[in-house]
Image (spheres, rainbow, N blue to C red):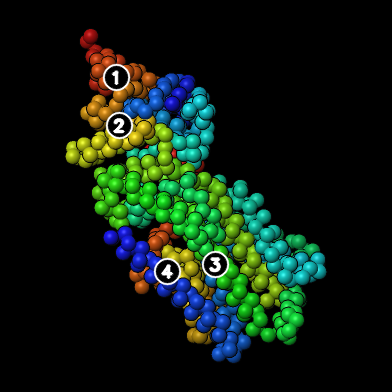
Amino acid sequence: MVTQNWKYKTKNFRYRKLITFIGLVLIFVGLPFIVHSPYYIHLLIIAGMNAILAMTFIMILRTGLISLGIAAFWGIGAYASAAFVMKGEVSFWLALPAATVITGLISWAVGYLLVRNPGFGFLILTAVIGMLISLVFGNISWLGGFTGIEYISPPNPIDISFLAPILFISKIPYYFLMLGLFLLVLISFWALYHSSTGRAWMAIGLNPHLAESIGVNVFRYRLIAFVIASAVAGLEGSFYAHYIGSINPNAFNIFKTINIHIYAILGGTGSVFLGPIIGTLIMTFVPESLRIAKEIEPILTGALLILLIIFLPGGILSLFNLRHRHSEGTAGITRAIKKSFLLIGKKQKETHAPS
Amino acid sequence: MLQVRNLSKFFGGLAAISDLDFDILNSEILGVIGPNGAGKTTLFNVISGFYTPTRGRVIFDSHDITGLKAHQVAHVGISRTFQASNLFMSLSVLDNIFTCHHMSYRTSIWKRFLHTPSAIEEERRLRGKALEILEFMGLDPLKDELAGRLTHGQQKALGLCMALATDPKLLLLDEPVTGMNPVEIQTMLNLIGRIRSRGVTIAIVEHNMQAVMNLCDRIIVLNHGQKIAEGSHKEIIENQEVIEAYLGKDEES
């Protein structure tokens, strides 16, 4: 009797979620017909991109790792795509998946070496990648050195026989392209989190030793999370390069990664989708609407982050007391950092085994 | 069922286990006892793949499993519990066990996403199996409680359920009754007995002598990483070396 009741409740809940999701999608589809200011459309596009980057951060965090190299892989995707289109004369529609695959392959090679050192090692090594990437790009003259690549051509027009061709001149086509990519990533992530892979990630994030002893290949599943997250960051990088039209190495430095972390932490890392989306929207629109001078913005973001960690460690979502299944808030982050520091100086292999 | 041959594990120059030889026989309960620091937990960590042995072989069902990783050892059918309560604290009791079905879960991502009949069927089957284990262990009234909210005794029982959920042939229990009151100990011993009657072979590390003596068919005694005695509990109690290991040598004799 009790079980049936429970099933009924979850089923009802699932439909309510689905209806809310479709409603939100319809709102975002209709938005450009109401909001005519290209400036706000631009902000929405950037927010969508940043929200996805924040989601990739959370995907890696779920497996108990903190990556400081998200912007680096974002940059690799951007440069790969720009190089394909500008040097290789390939269509954008081919360069987009190609950049994703290349970022995925590079992250697989890097992750294969880094993911073996969970905790402090991973944190520092990804930070090194995050800091070095701008220097690496800056010193490849073929990729434009420190001035970067300019005048990247926009996506090729989409020709549909019975409609006028869709040209990427105004912001609107970019907005819908972003919305499409956003939905694609959202649905794939949702499917992943609800599959056995997602369950294995959750098990690793909650208790890596126990996960191992029930037969979860911890290294493999961490690597999967790292590669998927990085490949998606590469996808966003490819979009970014063609949307902005020019890229330079400094756009992909470690401060971008830290901003991505702030978006996720502000919204609440206990939620895989809602937290990053809310955090990013707030961080994009609130400073803009207050017309804060660019010079003091970093100071305000820094102060905000400190206040958040002290007073609202679970992020904005924790205010609504959402009883999310994985709800752990930033407690997960603090724990991961604490663990990282405890591991310094000890032999990794020996500290691994439980008592 | 499990053969351990010349097993040694060194930490730096310190031998936690040295040249250990013993067998675990089919569907028996083997007790591993010894003073603190005798290498009992290290032994379990080596068998279950958390440590790589320095020397020696571990053979399970005539497969050499020496040096396999912990998750690979789980795949051949050896499951373990931990000394400290080691659970997914923020998940419910039922979800804890459901998570342990990782190895037998077959549904692909897209089938799960589209809720195909086979995906729903598998989910229902595994949930049923998890419930069955909970009922078997008497934890079913607590299935929706968070694991972190259980009492110590219940958490240990849940740990046992989780080890059982991986369908092991050999179960390694690391101090299953430590820190429990006598009533909880009795419940736990009954549970372990019932698991054995399902045909699961069990090895136990435990400090509680009463529990070990009541439960185990055979006992091996470790001291300083070496086996000093082996046999039924009667033989162990009368063994001079064991008495010395526990109580110290009589200087005057």
Q: CA distance from mark 3 to mark 4?
A: 15 Å
Q: Which residue is mark 3?
A: A187
Is residue A119 among what the camera can see?
no
- Which-is-in-front pick, marks 3 and 4? 4
**Type of amino acid at the residue the image marks with label 3:** Ile
Q: Are dots 2 and 3 on a single chain?
A: no
Q: Secondary structure at mark 1?
A: loop
Task: Tell me the chain of label 4.
Answer: A
Residue A355 lies, with reference to residue B101, above or below; the image says above
Whole-angstrom CA distance, mark 1 to mark 3, is 60 Å
Q: Residue B206, labelled with which disc?
A: 2
* Callout 1 amino acid: Ser
**Residue nearer the viewer, B118 or B81:** B118
Instruction: Identify the residue at horizontal 63%, vertical 55% (top origin).
Output: A107
Q: Identity of the amino acid at label 2?
A: Glu
Q: Secondary structure at mark 4?
A: helix
